[in-house]
Image: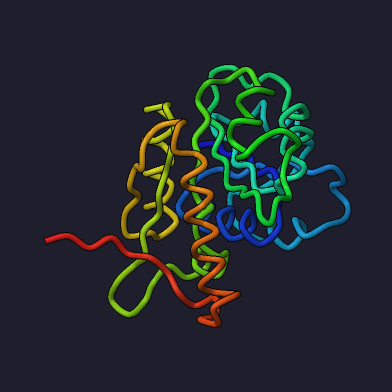
Amino acid sequence: MNIAIIGTGNVGGALATKWANAGHLIHLGVRDPETGKHLALLDNINTDCCSVLDAVKRSEVILIATPAPAAIEVAKSLGNTEGKVIIDAMNIVMGRGPENYTNTAEALLDNTQTRDVVKCFNTTGFNNMVDTNYGELAIDAFVAGDSSKGQEIAKQLALDAGFGACYSIGGNDRFHLQEQFAWFWINLAMFQGHGREIGFKLLSR
């Protein structure tokens, strides 16, 4: 699968590495090919960098992992996204997000051509994407969005990144809930003093 990564910080970098190692072709969409965190990612197999527009043109799937306040600007920079899947890994934290939106996925839907927008890879820290394993268990991922196509792709990419499973929590009306779940992890990790090395696993019997 050809995947455009927009946002090559901790989250984008961790997923780019995992997906490249799983055999996907990774196109890092960057403003300046000569400087930035993305340069270290070019040591990965199956990885190149180019402009944001070119990365989107080459890809069927687009991961957005930029700071939430930039969501609208980033959406407008993608060019034609018709028929492509956008995976939103952003969160509005402490009220910092796109103006007039309560979650970033709706901002992406309103400012792109595609209807295949899902939210995934936003409910845990990047350290848990670098290493998804806790002993013999792998933590789980979660996805929200009306797009069945987007959900299926996100679920497969979660497995390819080493998550134990990826569970749907519903459609577009659950975007806000998924961001609240991310805040739940942040609260436990940062404000309640448990540290970043914690993760969630859905158990059933």
**Rendered view: 181 above or below 83:** below
The image quadrant that residue 37 belongs to is bottom right
- Percent position (x, y) of residue 172? 46, 31
Residue at x 60%, y 40% (from the top left corner) = 103
Give 1 or 183, whichever is nearer the viewer: 183
Residue 145 spot, x, y in % from top left = 44, 33
In the rendered image, the vertical position of residue 66 relative to residue 101, given as above or below = below
Name the residue at 51% across, 63% down: 129
Q: How is the image coloured?
A: rainbow
Image coordinates for residue 144, horizontal then vertical, percent? 43, 39
Give the side of residue 78 with respect to residue 104, left or right. right
Q: Residue at x 58, y 47 (%)?
A: 89
Give the residue furthest to the left. Answer: 205
**Number of numbered discs visible in the structure rendering:** 0
Q: Closer to the camera, 36 or 34? A: 36
Who's the residue at 33% across and 47% down the image?
167
Say if 101 sits above or below 121 in the image: above
Where is the C terminus found, in terms of image quarters? bottom left
Q: Quadrant of residue 9?
A: bottom right
Q: Position of residue 118 (x, y in %)?
A: 49, 35
Q: Is residue 63 left or right of residue 37?
A: left
